[in-house]
Image (cartoon, rainbow, N blue to C red):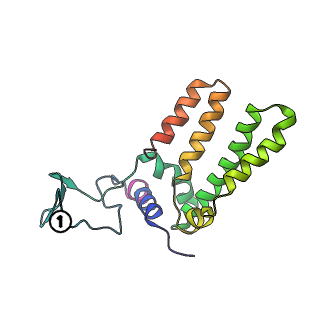
């Protein structure tokens, strides 16, 4: 397969850092491909890199639920394919969540048609294949938490709704 993109590489590296080596992914290099160069507010010298005077350690650039959400897949599937397999599972979870959400909001006689339109809209981006399964972009995990958060809200499960949206925000700022 093709090499993964930077988001997948960072996410995989963060999981390895914390769960395989017991290291803090924010204090250890998890941004594999980048090196900062001197510039406005960026100092680079023998002591390392500082941005706005603060040490820059090339740590994981997203919030922890992003890499934690992919950890079960990293434990089962070797290497970067764990991100791709995770995205496949998340894709089908989102697919199912969209159907469940639509069915909770429309009358019985309209469910098939409205679900078909919603699923078609969800599946329509041409970039899905390359983004999720070639490059391993991990942002779909946010959609899973959000879709099921909306479903929990529709069912008046407010605590669960709050937890799911909290998990979405604990992945990456939207």
Q: Is residue 120 left or right of residue 70?
A: right
Part of the protein shown in magenta: 16-21
Q: Residue 58 is drawn in which quadrant? A: bottom left
Which type of secondary structure does the marked residue at label 1 adopt? loop
Q: For the residue carrying disc 1, how many other residues have a C-alpha within 10 Å: few (<14), some (14-19), or many (20+)? A: few
The residue located at (63%, 59%) in the rendering is 125
| The residue positioned farthest toward the bottom in the image shown | 1
The residue located at (57%, 30%) in the rendering is 161
What count of labels does the image hold?
A: 1
Pinpoint residue 39: horizontal percent, then vertical percent.
Answer: 18, 63
Pinpoint residue 24: horizontal percent, then vertical percent.
Answer: 33, 52
Q: Residue 132 is drawn in which quadrant? A: bottom right
Q: Residue 99 is drawn in which quadrant? A: top right
| The residue positioned farthest toward the left in the image shown | 46
Indicate whether residue 116 is drawn in magenta: no
Pinpoint residue 7: horizontal percent, then vertical percent.
Answer: 45, 61
Q: Is residue 130 left or right of residue 39?
A: right
Whether residue 154 is situated above or below residue 85 in the rendered picture: above
The residue located at (59%, 65%) in the rendering is 133
Image quarter of the N terminus: bottom right
Q: Nearer the viewer, residue 71 or 57?
A: 57
Pinpoint residue 115: horizontal percent, then vertical percent.
Answer: 77, 44
Q: Is residue 73 left or right of residue 45?
A: right
Indicate whether residue 19 is drawn in magenta: yes
The residue located at (45%, 58%) in the rendering is 11
Residue identifier under label 1? 38
Whether residue 145 is situated above or below residue 39 in the rendered picture: above
- Most common secondary structure along the magenta stretch: helix
């Amino acid at each position: 397969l093709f090499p993964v993109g930077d988001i997948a590489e960072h996410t995989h590296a963060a999981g390895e850092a914390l769960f395989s080596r017991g290291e803090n992914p924010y204090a250890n290099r998890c941004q594999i491909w980048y090196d900062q160069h001197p510039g406005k507010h960026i100092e680079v010298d023998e002591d390392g890199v500082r941005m706005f005077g603060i040490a820059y350690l090339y740590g994981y650039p997203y919030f922890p639920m992003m890499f934690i959400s992919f950890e079960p897949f990293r434990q089962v599937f070797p290497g970067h394919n764990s991100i791709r397999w995770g995205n496949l599972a998340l894709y089908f979870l989102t697919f199912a969540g969209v159907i469940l959400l639509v069915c909770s909001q429309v009358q019985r006689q309209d469910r098939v048609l409205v679900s078909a339109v919603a699923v078609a809209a969800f599946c329509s981006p041409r970039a899905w294949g390359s983004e999720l399964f070639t490059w391993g972009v991990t942002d779909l995990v946010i959609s899973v938490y959000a879709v099921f958060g909306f479903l929990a809200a529709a069912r008046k499960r407010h605590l669960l709704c709050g937890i799911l949206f909290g998990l979405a925000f604990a992945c990456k700022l939207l």
